[in-house]
Image (spheres, rainbow, N blue to C red):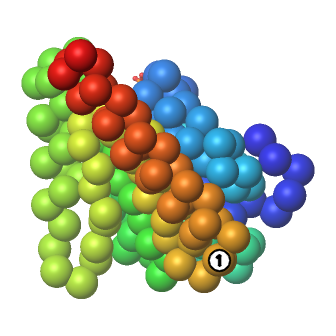
Amino acid sequence: MSAATPLVGLVMGSDSDWPVMRLAAEALAEFDVPFEADVVSAHRMPQEMIAYGENAAGRGLRVIIAGAGGAAHLPGMLAAVTPLPVIGVPVPLKYLDGMDSLLSIVQMPAGVPVATVAVGGARNAGLLAVRVLAAADAGLRDRMAAFQAALRDQAHAKGERLRA
Ligand code: RP5
């Protein structure tokens, strides 16, 4: 966690989601993006969840990453009460391989978007949040471009190893 004012709110329905959601935290930390992490359960603390969404923009957050598993209503409910972009992470649980989480998050009605990443795809959620912030931050954009160039170099190296 950074001491700077958080720009990203990284929330999840339970601390049991953290082994997945920490991948988003790691991606944000790689780009030195200040973030906060917390448990905000749509079902177990609905009033607090609504307050979190309603207050997020006013507190200076620019993006919310929300992860949940099973009946995963957290990302969609937050998107309903904040104008900020919300990135949803379907967390896989013991049953149904995360399909329940995915469908709960991805099937939003028109007008209330949630940018849904893959089941367990919290790293991409973190990277997408960086890209959202980079749209208005040239320095961050340069760092994202360098990150992408490194991915390209790694892919080239893999091909070279196969061809050798
Ligand atoms: C969801 O219920 C949470 O996001 C978590 O994925 C799931 C199980 O929560 P715990 O019973 O482990 O607290 O709301």
Q: Nearer the viewer, residue 107 or 6?
A: 6
Determine if residue 156 is in view: yes
Using residue 100 as the reference point, say whether residue 36 is left or right of it: right
Q: Nearer the viewer, residue 111 or 116?
A: 116
Could you tell me which residue is drawn at 45 percent across and 52 percent down? Answer: 148
* Res 43 quadrant in image: top left
Q: Quadrant of ligand 1?
A: top left
- Number of marks: 1
Residue at the disc numbered 1: 138
Q: Is residue 112 above or below residue 36?
A: below
* Label 1 CB sits under 8 Å from any ligand 1 atom: no
Q: Identify the image quadrant of the N terminus.
A: top right
* Res 38 quadrant in image: top right
Could you tell me which residue is drawn at 40 percent across and 34 percent down? Answer: 154
Q: Where does residue 59 sit, x and y in percent of width and height? A: 74, 72
User: Which residue lies most toward the front here?
Assistant: 164
Q: Where does residue 118 sit, x and y in percent of width and height? A: 24, 43
**Label 1 neighbour load within 10 Å: few <14, some 14-19, many 20+:** few
Could you tell me which residue is drawn at 19 percent across and 31 percent down? Answer: 98
Q: Identify the image quadrant of the C terminus.
A: top left
Q: Nearer the viewer, residue 128 or 141?
A: 141
User: Which residue lies most toward the right here?
Assistant: 3
* Res 89 quadrant in image: top left
Q: Is residue 126 above or below residue 100?
A: below
Using residue 41 as the reference point, say whether residue 48 is left or right of it: right
Q: Where does residue 66 sit, x and y in percent of width and height? A: 45, 51
Could you tell me which residue is drawn at 28 percent across and 19 percent down? Answer: 161
State the SS at label 1. Answer: helix
Determine if residue 70 is in view: no
- The amino acid type of the residue labelled 1 equals Ala
Q: Where does residue 69 sit, x and y in percent of width and height? A: 31, 35
Using residue 148 as the reference point, say whether residue 97 is left or right of it: left
